[in-house]
Image (cartoon, rainbow, N blue to C red):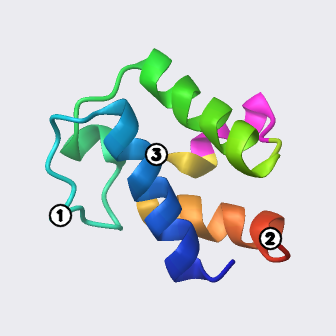
């Protein structure tokens, strides 16, 4: 997957988890939690959905890498390159 594909996939997952949020103006450099209402369970849902859809394993110690769209895409790119 390309970085653009990964970003689109993360936006799709976010839209499922937070359907009332407007994700069109998402700033890739800002933390998700500063832009949309996500609690810790929503965050775990993102991790679980990535695992379910793409078999991507994200260890708990790496959760901080998923704070913003830019850091999420950068973290996932090598893991999803061959998908």
Compare marks 1 and 2 and give the one earlier in the sequence: 1
Label 1 Cα crowd, 10 Å radius (few <14 / some 14-19 / many 20+): few
The quadrant of the picture occupied by the N terminus is bottom right
Query: Could you give the CA–CA distance between mark 3 and mark 1, rounded to whole angstroms?
Result: 14 Å
Q: Name the residue under label 1.
A: 24
Q: In which quarter of the image is residue 61?
A: top right
- From the viewer's perspective, is 37 left or right of 72? left
Residue closest to the eye, 44 or 17:
17
Q: Name the residue under label 2.
A: 83
Label 3 Cα crowd, 10 Å radius (few <14 / some 14-19 / many 20+): some
Query: Could you give the CA–CA distance between mark 2 and mark 3, rounded to whole angstroms?
Result: 17 Å
Q: Name the residue under label 3.
A: 13
What residue is drawn where x is 23% and y is 30%?
37
Mark 1 in CB contact with mark 2 (< 8 angstroms) = no
- From the viewer's perspective, is 81 left or right of 9? right
Query: Could you give the CA–CA distance between mark 1 and mark 2, rounded to whole angstroms?
Result: 25 Å
What residue is drawn where x is 15% and y is 34%?
20
Q: What is the magenta range?
A: 58-64
Residue 50, image x and y in percent? 66, 44
Residue 49 is at least partly visible in this image: yes
Element carrying mark 2: loop
Residue 83, image x and y in percent? 80, 70
What predominant SS class does the magenta segment belong to?
A: helix
Look at the image and say whether residue 43 sits in the magenta stretch.
no
Residue 43, image x and y in percent? 49, 29
Compare marks 2 and 3 and give the one earlier in the sequence: 3
Element carrying mark 1: loop
Element carrying mark 3: helix
Residue closest to the eye, 14 or 69:
14
Q: In which quarter of the image is residue 5?
A: bottom right
Residue 68 is at least partly visible in this image: no
């Amino acid at each position: 997957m390309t970085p653009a594909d990964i970003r689109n996939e993360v936006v799709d997952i976010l839209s499922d988890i937070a359907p009332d949020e407007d994700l069109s103006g998402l700033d890739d450099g800002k933390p998700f939690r500063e832009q949309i209402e996500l609690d810790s369970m929503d965050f775990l849902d993102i991790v679980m959905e990535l695992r379910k859809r793409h078999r991507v394993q994200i260890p708990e110690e790496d959760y901080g890498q998923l704070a913003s769209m830019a850091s999420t895409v950068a973290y996932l790119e090598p893991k999803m390159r061959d998908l």
